[in-house]
Amino acid sequence: MIEVENLTKNYGSYQALKGISFTVKKGEILGFLGPNGAGKTTTMRILTGFFPATSGKAKVAGFDVFEEPLEVKKRIGYLPENVPLYRDMVVSDYLRFTAGIKGIKKMDIGDRVRKVMQDCALTDVSHKLIGELSKGYRQRVGLAQALVNDPEVLILDEPTIGLDPKQIIEIRKLIKNLAGKRTIILSTHILPEVSMTCQRVVIINKGEVVAVDTPQNLTSKIYGRNKLIIRIDGPSGDIQRELKTVRGVDKVEVKEVMSGSVSEYIVDIKEGEDPRRWVASQVVKNGWGLLEMRPLEMSLEEIFIKLVTKE
Ligand SMILES: Nc1ncnc2c1ncn2[C@@H]1O[C@H](COP(=O)(O)OP(=O)(O)O)[C@@H](O)[C@H]1O
Ligand SMILES: [Mg+2]
C-alpha cells in the first residue's frame, strides 16, 4: 500500500533524510519510531504531498506522490503534529467544512460527518466550540478531520503527544479500532506506544532506518535468548560456583539480593545453547529452592538505545 524507496530530503545544506526505504502492507499499522529530529515528520510530509523529497521515490496505493499528488491526497488522511484547528468553530461545522475542502459531495457531507463523529466519540461535543475542548477532545477532532473522506491510508504524526495518560489510552484504542481496512503509519518517539498499537516498527535515527521488525522480534533479536534471570533460595557463593559448571552456562552474576538467602542471578548463556533444564536439575540436586527462571528480555527502550548508539 505504501512504498518508500531511498528518500532523501535536504533543508539547505542539512540532510534530514539520508535515503529512507520501507514498505507498509495493506491493513497494517506501522510504527514509525525515532527520537526527536530523526526525520519522522519530514517523511510524513513527503508522503502526504506537503513538500517534495530531494530524491527518491514514494508511492501510496500505487500512485507516485510526486507525479500524481491529487490521487494520493484523495486516499490519505493526515493528522499533522500540530493540527490547525479553528478554535472559534463548532465541532460539527468544522468537520463539515473540512469535508467540503476534501471534495466530498454536498449530499454526502452530513452522513460522513455523523459517521466520523461517532467513530471518534465526538457526538456529545458536536455543538461545542473547538477552543473550549480539552486537548484530548481536540486530538479526536484532528483524527476525525483526517478520517472524514474515508481514506484508505492514515498518516498520524505523534497522535498522543501532549495528552494525559487517560486520553492516551482512549486515542490508542481509537486508532486500533480504525485498523483492519485502513493502512496506518503512526509516528512516535515513545517506545511503549508501538508495542501497544503496531504490528511492525520502522526505527529511524538521524535520517536513516536503523531497524525494521515486529516489536516482539526486535526484543528477542537484539537480546536473543542469551541471558537468563534465575531466582534461587540458597547460599550465594555455592550457587555462583556450581552454576558456572553447568553445561551451556558462560557466566553467573548476582543481579539482586532479594531477602535473606534469596537472590536473583543473571546467567550468560553460551551461543546456541539452552541450559535451562540443566540449571534446574543442578539447583534441585543441591537442595536449593528454584523460585523463578526466565529469559532476560530487553525493553524496547533498551533496544532502541542499543540501536541508535551502535555507531
Ligand atoms: N523546515 C525545516 N528547515 C530546516 N530544518 C528542518 C526543517 N524541518 C525539520 N528540520 C530538521 O530536520 C530534522 C528532522 O526533523 P523532523 O522530520 O521534524 O524530525 P522528527 O519529526 O523525527 O522529530 C531535524 O534536525 C530538524 O531540525
Ligand atoms: Mg516530528
Image: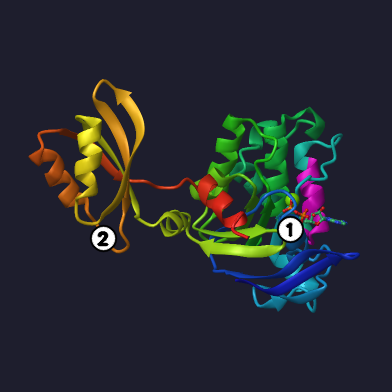
Residue at the image position 77 percent from the left and 54 percent from the top: 99
Most distant residue in the right direction: 12
Magenta-drawn stretch, dominant element (helix, strand or loop): helix
Tell me if residue 100 is in the magenta stretch: yes
Which quarter of the picture shows residue 71?
bottom right
Between marks 1 and 2 in the image, the one whose residue lies nearer the viewer: 2
Q: Which mark is residue 273?
A: 2
Q: Which contiguous range is marked in magenta?
A: 93-105
Q: Is mark 1 within 8 Å of ligand 1?
A: yes
* Residue 278 in the figure: left or right of residue 304: left
Assign a secondary structure to mark 2.
loop
In the rendered image, residue 105, in percent from the top left (x then y), is placed at 76, 61
Assign a secondary structure to mark 1.
loop
Q: Residue 51 carries which label?
A: none
* Residue 64 in the figure: left or right of residue 87: left
In the rendered image, residue 234, in percent from the top left (x then y), is placed at 19, 30
So how many labels did they put on this image? 2
**Type of amino acid at the residue the image marks with label 1:** Gly
Out of 98 and 110, give the one closest to the viewer: 98
For the N terminus, the image quarter is bottom right
Q: Do the residues labelled 1 and 2 touch (CB within 8 Å)?
A: no
Q: Earlier in the sequence, mark 1 or mark 2?
A: 1
Q: In this view, does 16 lie above or below 138?
A: below
Residue at the image position 50 percent from the left and 46 percent from the top: 196
Instruction: Give the residue at mark 1.
Output: 39
Q: In this view, does 110 lie above or below 66?
A: above
**Type of amino acid at the residue the image marks with label 2:** Glu
Out of 299 and 97, give the one closest to the viewer: 299
For the C terminus, the image quarter is bottom right
Q: In this view, does 257 lie above or below 299?
A: above
